[in-house]
Image (cartoon, grey):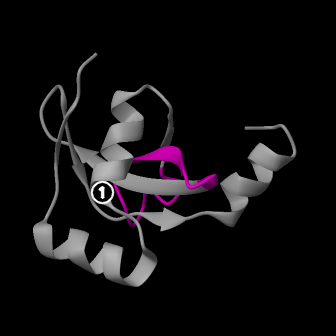
Amino acid sequence: MEIDFEWDLKKAEKVLAERGIRFEDVEGEVRADRFIDVKVKNQKDHPDQRMFVVRIDDYAVCAPYVKVGKNRARLVTAFKSRVFNKEKESGNG
């Protein structure tokens, strides 16, 4: 299934400046079908939010998103994840 992406440009600039992660790189990994899709654990604070987990520069990156319509995802933020990185290193991811 083809997914269209959207995000807030100011948020994308902030994530790049503070964390060195480009939303375009997340989008590229998802389009290349190199991702897992998980539900955000804290649904109380983040209802209906899901998360793409991709590898960028050989490190796990989580990118929470909200579905907008049937085939559209609005990226909320992106951050490196020690938890998912450890799972990959131990062979569980």
Q: Which residue is mark 1?
A: 23
Quadrant of the rendered structure where residue 5 is?
top left
The stretch drawn in magenta includes residue 56: yes
Residue drawn at x 40%, y 27% as measured from the top left? 32
Q: Position of residue 18 (x, y in %)?
A: 39, 83
Figure check: 8 above or below 38: below
Figure check: 77 above or below 34: below
Instruction: Let me know if residue 93 appears in the view.
Output: yes
Q: Quadrant of the C terminus?
A: top right
The stretch drawn in magenta includes residue 15: no
- Furthest residue to the front? 57
In the image, which residues are magenta? Answer: 40-59
Instruction: Let me know if residue 48 appears in the view.
Output: no
Residue drawn at x 22%, y 75% as measured from the top left? 13
> SS at mark 1?
helix
Q: Position of residue 7 (x, y in %)?
A: 16, 57
Quadrant of the rendered structure where residue 12 is?
bottom left
Figure check: 15 above or below 51: below
